[in-house]
Image (spheres, helix red, strand yellow):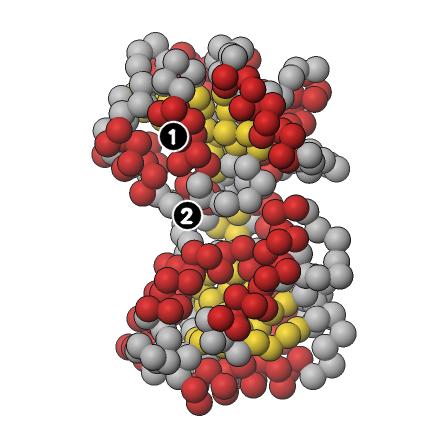
Amino acid sequence: MIDPSAALEVLLRAEVDLFTGVPDSLLKEFNSCVVGQLGPDSHVVAPNEGSAVALAAGHFLASGRPALVYLQNSGLGNAVNPLLSLTSGEVFGIPMILMIGWRGEPGTSDEPQHRHQGRVTEDMLGLLDIPVHKLGPDSVEWQSILESAVEVALDTSRPTAVVVSAGTFSPYEGPSESRGHSGPLRVEAIETVLDTLHDDTFYVATTGYTARELGFARHKRGEPDDHDLLVVGSMGHAMSIALGIALARPEAAVVCLDGDGSLAMHLGAMAMIGQRQPPNLGQVLLDNGMHESVGGQPSALRDADPAGIARACSYAAVGSSHDLDGLVRVLNEATAGPGPWFVQVKLGRGTIPGLPRPDNLMQRSRRLMGALKA
């Protein structure tokens, strides 16, 4: 395994002096090291991977030094446009290093949403004409691999990729920052929403702990799950999925259970909702100020005002709470009239030990379709 502090030191010596991206579970130890050891002038948690690539491009244009963009391989889709139309050697020729967590790597066991992505990761990078370097737990020459990735990027004026297998980085021992908000646990807020809103409400739960905890809550309560879509991938798109359902079924009450990291990724969905004004759509922002499921790194919205953004996007009702009693109050106020409505609840850190992952995904989606047609 590779000491993340040693890896960071190698990159800094190679004059990689900006680190940006979206935190990933396979890169958790490296991400925590970057958060703990670098200040705001050298590290930016980006709302999405495409923004991180663009930020790295601007940094190189101003400094002549490459940046490192960290991401999970599922985030390649967000990055394709700037990688091809901005950083390509056929366009502006901007070097940078992409450190990519290889979820679903062939030959490993992983979840359905990662297996397909993992299988095509190398092919995608090949189509993008991005040279690939690989790091794994047994990489003896890991220092040379990182140095080569930087050298090739600079020599060929294009991005290079360092694809990282599971278990590559050893646990990070050092200062870290996981400052989020204080408040109730997310699962407590989810159960409060279920208790407060009407039983026939349809829910779209964002990826990560939110979807898994909604599934857990339904099981614990002995309730059917045919009104729930547990979005296991497609981070940042839960609100757009919920909008699509709400527009197609205007008679159904639809609520998105969103997270601050997810919402930040595609914040423009709120403008789209404000423009369409669906009266049957609501959004509950479960806001702990961090990317908790991948290590607790701060989210891009940690110090922002999501409720203020909702007001600016012309949501019909907006509320915010720091506790469960307040959540009940603002939910009742928000749902007293037509939507779209937005309710933010600030949460503390923590989840359920041994939290199960959703399975039988296609069957779940078909049960939801059946309930929507009923």
Q: Is residue 148 left or right of residue 141?
A: left
In the picture shown, does residue 129 fall above or below 182?
Answer: below
Q: Are marks 2 and 1 in contact (CB under 8 Å)?
A: no
In front: 113, or 5? 113
The amino acid sitting under disc 2 is: Met
In the picture shown, does residue 51 fall above or below 184?
Answer: below
Residue 124 in the image: x percent, y percent? Answer: 52, 66
The residue under the point 31% across, 11% down is 337
Q: Is residue 102 left or right of residue 247?
A: right
The residue under the point 34% across, 39% down is 269
Residue 206 in the image: x percent, y percent? Answer: 51, 36
Q: Which residue lies under the disc numbered 2?
A: 265
User: In the picture, which quadrant includes the N terminus?
Assistant: bottom right
Residue 28 in the image: x percent, y percent? Answer: 61, 58
In the picture shown, does residue 6 fall above or below 124?
Answer: below
The residue under the point 36% across, 65% down is 82
Residue 341 in the image: x percent, y percent? Answer: 34, 23
In front: 272, or 309? 272
The amino acid sitting under disc 1 is: Leu
In front: 199, or 47? 199
State the CA–CA distance, disc 2 to disc 1: 16 Å
Q: Which residue lies under the disc numbered 1?
A: 243
The crowd level at tag 2 (other Cα within 10 Å; few <14, some 14-19, many 20+) is many
Would residue 39 be visible to someone looking at this image? no
Dividing the picture into quadrants, the one containing residue 292 is top right
In the picture shown, does residue 319 fall above or below 50?
Answer: above
Q: Is residue 15 left or right of residue 51?
A: right
Q: Is residue 374 left or right of residue 243?
A: right
